[in-house]
Image: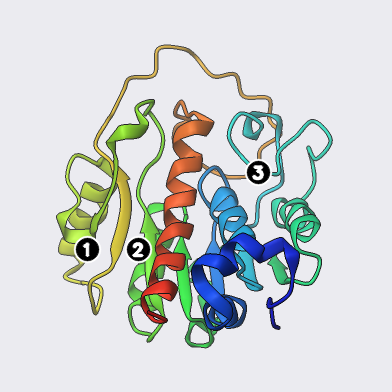
């Protein structure tokens, strides 16, 4: 797909040129998890000119998603997240090729995904074990891999930063993953960048469980759209930055 002459991407073209727009349009990207972080990452990618995007998530939209997830509104409650997000993204660029997979990435499903066919793999998974599995599998491919650490219990956007996985500090999720890798005597085959934030605030309220969410979490933590969106946009920015670095 060529974006040259497409007015949607006129401003991007001023920065990237025709060659750069072509690189954006031809890049194949997959996002695992399209909740508070992944949904905004998908938006950032599509608005930047990515035209081949696969989104993977097994959950349905529930009312508690509305405070932070792009496609979650009072009208989309009950819909599969990937379907609601795909509809939103196609409104931005109707010519984009978006594959929506209502599936969870796990030991049971991992072999269904041919990760080697993608140029970029993005991890926005909540589950510790599934996240660890994706890190291992993604790093066995030649694809560029980016991962999101925990975005909950944070309000200060200035604390969000990027570091190599083993250099992430102050993030409980990052620490738990490193501990899990060491206990299993495993390690990703190569280095990769993570978006993280070392702010960890307490939950001071009590969440009400309305029974409408399908995912299984040990605890629900407080979140804000401003932080989760910046996490997501930073992930998309890392992809765009990498593509830009290859055309200059």
Is residue 107 positioned above or below 38 on the image? Answer: below
Q: Please give the residue where the numbered disc 1 appears in the rendered image.
A: 181
Residue 126 appears in view: no
Q: Earlier in the sequence, mark 3 or mark 1?
A: 1
Which residue lies at the image location 24% right of the left edge and 79% below the top edge? 189
Is residue 151 positioned above or below 186 on the image? Answer: above
Q: Position of residue 186 (x, y in %)?
A: 21, 72
Residue at the far top in the pictured view: 205
The numbered mark at residue 49 is none
Cα separation between marks 3 and 1:
28 Å
Left or right placement of residue 68 versus residue 190 in this view: right
Q: Please give the residue where the numbered disc 2 appears in the rendered image.
A: 132
**How many neighbours does mark 1 have within 10 angstroms: few (below 14), some (14-19), or many (20 or more)?**
some
* Callout 3 touching callout 1 (CB < 8 Å): no
Left or right placement of residue 31 versus residue 164 in this view: right
Left or right placement of residue 126 versus residue 94 in this view: left
């Amino acid at each position: 797909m060529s974006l040259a002459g497409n007015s949607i991407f006129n401003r991007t073209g001023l920065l990237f040129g025709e060659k750069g727009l072509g690189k954006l349009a031809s890049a194949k990207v997959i996002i695992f998890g399209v909740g508070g972080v992944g949904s905004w990452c998908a938006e950032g990618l599509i608005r930047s000119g990515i035209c081949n995007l696969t989104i993977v998530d097994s959950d349905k939209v529930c009312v508690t998603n509305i405070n932070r997830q792009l496609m979650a509104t009072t009208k989309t409650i009950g819909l599969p997240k990937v379907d609601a997000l795909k509809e939103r993204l196609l409104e931005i660029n109707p010519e984009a090729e978006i594959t929506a997979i209502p599936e969870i990435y796990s030991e049971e499903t991992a072999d269904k995904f041919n990760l080697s066919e993608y140029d970029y793999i993005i991890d926005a998974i909540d589950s510790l074990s599934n996240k660890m599995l994706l890190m291992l599998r993604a790093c066995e491919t030649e694809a560029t891999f980016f991962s999101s650490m925990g975005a909950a219990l944070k309000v200060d956007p200035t604390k969000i930063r990027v570091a190599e996985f083993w250099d992430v500090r102050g993030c409980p999720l990052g620490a738990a993953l490193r501990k899990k890798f060491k206990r299993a005597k495993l390690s990703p085959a190569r280095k990769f960048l993570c978006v993280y934030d070392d702010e960890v605030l307490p939950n001071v309220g009590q969440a009400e469980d309305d029974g409408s969410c399908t995912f299984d979490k040990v605890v629900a933590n407080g979140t804000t759209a401003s932080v989760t969106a910046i996490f997501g946009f930073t992930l998309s920015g890392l992809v765009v930055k990498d593509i830009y670095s290859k055309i200059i």
